[in-house]
Image (spheres, helix red, strand yellow):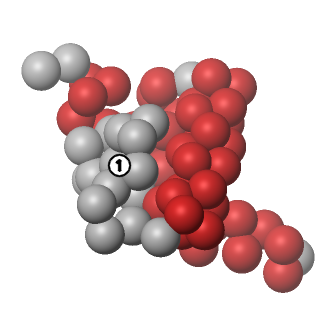
């Protein structure tokens, strides 16, 4: 298992919609995953590993974005 796989294990990156996932939730999830991957490409693996030592989740990324917006 590579470091990238371990880093994104807690993130549902599946491009298809889940059986009990509402379409609205699916669209939001896909946008958030796209945003996370964009930031990952911008700052790099080592930075992401230092910010998210236990892996990236949508909730952890949301809390960081919210904290930045409150500044």
Q: Secondary structure at mark 1?
A: loop
Is 43 left, or right, of 8 in this rendering?
right
Q: Percent x, y for residue 33?
A: 55, 45
Q: So how many labels did they put on this image?
A: 1
| 1 relative to 66 in the view: left or right | left
Which residue, given by chain and number where applicable, does mark 1 sit on?
A: 12
**Rendered view: 4 above or below 6:** above
Quadrant of the drawing holding the N terminus: top left
Percent from the top left, x then y, of residue 11?
35, 49
**Which quarter of the rendering shows the C terminus?**
bottom right
- Going 62% across and 39% down the picture, which residue do you hit? 34
Q: Is residue 63 in view from this perspective?
A: yes
Q: Is residue 32 visible?
A: no
- Please tell me which residue lies in front, 35 or 67: 35
Residue lying at the far top of the rendered structure = 2
Q: Is residue 40 left or right of residue 1?
A: right
Question: Which residue is outermost to the left?
Answer: 1
Whether residue 27 is situated above or below residue 60 in the rendered picture: above
Percent of width and height locating residue 67: 71, 75
**Residue sitting at x 84%, y 72%:** 69
Q: Is residue 38 above or below residue 31?
A: above
Instruction: Identify which residue, 7 or 47, lies in the foreground.
Output: 7
**Residue at (22%, 35%) from the top-left corner?**
6
Q: Which quarter of the figure has residue 15?
A: top left
Which of 51/2 is in front? 2
The 10 Å Cα crowd at callout 1, few under 14, some 14 to 19, many 20 or more, is few
- Of the pair 51 and 11, the residue shown nearer to us: 11
């Amino acid at each position: 298992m590579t470091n990238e796989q371990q880093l994104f294990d807690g993130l549902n990156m599946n491009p298809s919609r889940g059986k009990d996932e509402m379409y609205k939730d699916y669209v939001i999830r896909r946008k958030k995953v796209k945003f996370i991957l964009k930031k990952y490409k911008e700052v790099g693996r080592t930075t992401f590993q230092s910010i998210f030592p236990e892996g990236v989740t949508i909730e952890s990324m949301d809390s960081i974005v919210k904290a930045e917006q409150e500044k």
